[in-house]
Image (cartoon, coloured by chain):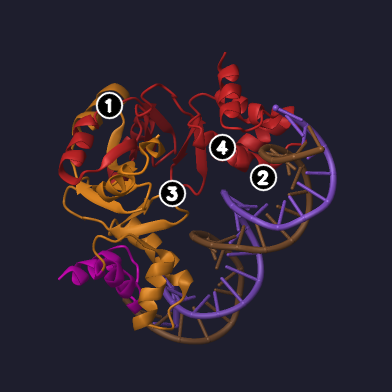
Chain colours: A red, B orange, C brown, D purple
Amino acid sequence: MEQERFKEVLRERGLKVTNQRLLVLETIASHPGEHLTAEEIYELAKEQYPEIGLATIYRTVQVLVELNVIDKVSFDDGFVRYELGNAKADSRHHHHHAICQECGRVLAFEGDLLETLEQALYDTMGFVVTDHEVKLTGYCRDCIKRKGQENMEEFN
Amino acid sequence: MEQERFKEVLRERGLKVTNQRLLVLETIASHPGEHLTAEEIYELAKEQYPEIGLATIYRTVQVLVELNVIDKVSFDDGFVRYELGNAKADSRHHHHHAICQECGRVLAFEGDLLETLEQALYDTMGFVVTDHEVKLTGYCRDCIKRKGQENMEEFN
DNA sequence: ATCAATGCAAAGGTTTTGCAAAAAT
DNA sequence: ATTTTTGCAAAACCTTTGCATTGAT
């Protein structure tokens, strides 16, 4: 069970296993494919634990990021968002995001096309890559369809 | 001259050409390779135009981003940063960033390795990519050298 | 019993907004 | 003359922090 592993990881680092920490992780884990803000996590967590505080959410996501249990992502809308990290042995195979600038929808997709790039970076500059993030912006199929009839100028 | 083109673009969109807008662009343009925050732009601009306000900087960078004259980037340090966009005919050839998590240095590099990925995204999901951003994190050569002697454990 | 974690409220820091004055068309 | 833009200050906003209390080991 995933939760048991999490408890172990906490103990290994001398951190305490609390209901709040379990709940925050569970909340994020139970919303796969979403990218929750601290506030959203807070609202969801409150449903199950009304006395939880927003500050605890902020402190907990920091811990979870540090433990590599969740990933921090940002779509430049003023919010930091969190999603379950794929804590594989090789943690560098994150998925990436395509953000529709019309409707804000976020498509996630896998891709390991950066290995060549990362190798080149090491060869030329001695930079060792430990993590990467690819963010694409554009227009999703639905928005293209919907706006297509009207005026393509809007797509610049 | 680049500035003339900028004036044209403003007029085309019904926006007014002001000293403040020219100055903000000039300030960013005269710091190539840097990634200035609004506050930094403000301090630099004040040297030449002391009565300029911070709110003007914020409003101006919004305009510049919308006009595709500058790009918005974030290195997750709590600041939104701005750099000159390469407003080429094909504006999709942005450069990318490798951020050292030890010293915070940012290396910029070019790379067009995403074309295959973007084509695949269109073929499978109908998503049209208009822009992309690649952010790598890791350790730069100097930090590897400096820490290398001490303790490799710190690199996880 | 000890030490970390929580909740609350207050503070922090960046970015936005309201509005009258100034500037551009 | 009209309409946008500016500057200032205040507000809004997300996030962090201080501190006494609670909870975990």
| Disc 2 from disc 1: Cα separation | 36 Å
> For the residue marked with disc 4, what is the amino acid?
Val
| Disc 1 from disc 4: Cα separation | 27 Å
| Disc 1: host chain | A
Q: Could you say which disc has been placed on residue A63 in the image?
A: 4
Q: Could you say which disc has been placed on residue A112 in the image?
A: 1
Looking at the rendered structure, the secondary structure element under dot 3 is loop
Residue placed most toward the observer, B2 or A24:
A24
Q: Local crowd at mark 4 within 10 Å, few (<14), some, or many (≥20)?
A: some
> Residue A113, position in %: x, y?
24, 29
- In the depicted structure, whether residue B85 falls above or below residue B135: below
| Disc 1 from disc 3: Cα separation | 23 Å
Q: Could you say which disc has been placed on residue A55 in the image?
A: 2
| Disc 3 from disc 4: Cα separation | 16 Å
Q: Residue at x 50, y 29 (%)?
A: A69
**Residues under numbered marks 3 and 4 in contact, where contact means CB atoms less than 8 Å apart:** no
> For the residue marked with disc 2, what is the amino acid?
Ala
> According to the image, label 3 marks what residue?
B76
| Disc 3: host chain | B
| Residue B81 visible within the image | yes
Q: Quadrant of the N terminus of chain B?
A: bottom left
> For the residue marked with disc 3, what is the amino acid?
Asp
> Residue A132, position in %: x, y?
33, 37
Mark 2 against mark 4, which lies toward the viewer? 4
Q: Quadrant of the C terminus of chain B?
A: top left
| Disc 4: host chain | A
- In the depicted structure, whether residue B3 falls above or below residue A28: below
**Residues under numbered marks 2 and 1 in contact, where contact means CB atoms less than 8 Å apart:** no
**Residues under numbered marks 3 and 2 in contact, where contact means CB atoms less than 8 Å apart:** no
> Magenta residues?
B1-30
- In the depicted structure, whether residue B85 falls above or below residue A96: below
- Which is more N-terminal, label 4 or label 1? 4
